[in-house]
Amino acid sequence: MNYKHISLNILNIVFWFFGGIYVLCGIVSYIYFDVKILTFFSIAGISCLVLGAIAFSLTPSRLVLRAKDGFIITSVSYVSLGLVGALPFLVLDTGVTNVTDGVFEAVSGLTTTGSTVLTGLDDMHPAILFYRQVLQWFGGMGIILLVVAILPLLGIGGMQLFKAEASGSAQQNIRPRVRETAKTLWLFYVGLTIMCAAAYWIAGMTLFDAICHSFSTVALGGFSTHDASIGFFNSVAIELVCIVFMLFAAVNFTLHFASWNQFWNSTKTAVHKLFKRNVTSRMIYQAQGGARAVFRIYFNDYEFRLFGGLTLALILISCIELLGYLGLEKFSLGDTIFQSVAFITTAGFSVTAHGDWPMSVTFLLILFACAGGCVGSTAGGLKMFRVLIILQQGWREIYRLLYPNGVFLIKLHKDFVPDRIVDAVWGLFALYIATLVILIFIVITISDMDFVTAFSAVAACLANLGPGLGDVAANYQNVTPAVKWVLVVAMILGRLEIITILILLVPKYWRI
């Protein structure tokens, strides 16, 4: 293993990443003028870009990246970005007084977890708020996916890094080359962010709030520019916009891409017929056929159907439970729908104090958050694809008991799922449960947390959800430093889907 080249690649990632972010924050600090903040982001941004250029010049123009190198670069990059990302929180006036809180906030942003130790957001400088939001935006599609688009420019292939972030899942390539796939997804990601910001602005947010919340909504991160989160605005229109884009961001982006292609091609064909042949009825029929084809793309996807069904089930169960608990006068359908969507998509936004809800509802919200959104989305959690495989494997075992000599295969769409993928999913699921149990045990051992708070804190961080229950329902400010470091580990494990980190602990990995 060439540690020198790997180190240079990690430095490239860290310096260029934060150089770009600091420059953007410097622009915001110039608009909302503050000498101290402007000076910090300007010096830090220029320094990072210069150091990035030096690291780039020292990196070999041609370097083959092996699979094992991809795992270590992925893991160390996340840790390094989290450590460096804590610097603005420590230097600027954010209320953070120790390294632990700074790293916790930075890692929470980069992993799109949304857990926070900050309060008084309403009075904080816009540049600092923007910094938090942009951390989540870049983390939304996975920092490594961004690296996949950049590393080829450095003469380094990217397939190994893509595999590192998506270990244990079926990878659905939009295009045959990873670099082209990454570019396509990022263009779509940017376009979705712009649409979300425009929708928020039209719904009544200020331009700054609209941009900031579009970053965390599309990334499903949950950071807000206000302590009360989305509830600060007290607007049905804004809540509806948030719900729509949370659901949109939690669906596999390859489905969105395929549906957009279908819609665009159908529209072009219809318009072509209109102008060339002047056949209006055929044009309308073509457009209708295109719309039906778009819906088929979504509803023929088993993972999408499972995600939609579980979302509706969670909303229905929560409504029934809360209606019986609160009564008709205090029950709010809008709040129930919003919180249900915010949890199952792992966005973590809030419009009400969900910690005051009955345990039967809040536990269910955490449980569904652990399942998460779809593979290929910005959601956290185990992912619906894996839940689907686990459910089908369960049914297969039942049929095997009924028909011992039968041969039963798991099928998704028109393809059979290889046993290798089924084994990988079960392996990841076992590691997920084991990691959850071990981290809960550690938290309870080193602190005086009650079980509900400890369970929800670990589960929320491992699923990259953010808000928990009990003492961590609002924020994590009062959590002890030792527990915060455990939760930082949980965030990174959850974002990199556990195996990417654990493989580094296997002695044979370093001997290959």
Image (cartoon, rainbow, N blue to C red):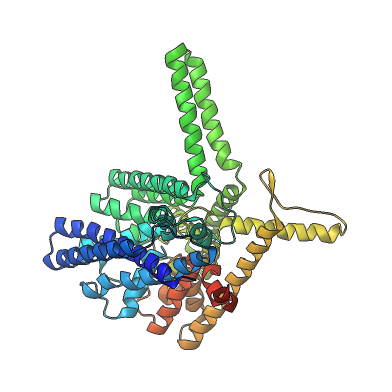
Which corner quadrant holds the C terminus? bottom right
Q: How many marks?
A: 0
392 left or right, relative to 157: right
Residue 374: x %, y % from top left: 53, 54
Residue at the limit of the structure toward the right, as seen here: 405
Residue 238 in view of the camera: yes
204 left or right, relative to 193: left
Going 37% across and 44% down the picture, which residue do you hit?
Answer: 191
On screen, residue 402 above or below 269: below
Residue 256: x %, y % from top left: 48, 43
169 left or right, relative to 41: right
- For the residue pair 405 and 230, the one nearer the viewer reads as 405
351 left or right, relative to 493: left
On screen, residue 174 above or below 54: above
Going 51% across and 83% down the picture, which residue do you hit?
Answer: 442
Residue 103: x %, y % from top left: 35, 74
Residue 226 in view of the camera: no
- For the residue pair 270 and 320, the one nearer the viewer reads as 270
On screen, residue 492 above or below 182: below
Going 55% across and 42% down the picture, which residue do you hit?
Answer: 298
Image quadrant assignment for residue 143: bottom left
- For the residue pair 77 and 97, the one nearer the viewer reads as 77
Residue 186: x %, y % from top left: 40, 49
- For the residue pair 234 and 220, the one nearer the viewer reads as 220
On screen, residue 107 above or below 250: below
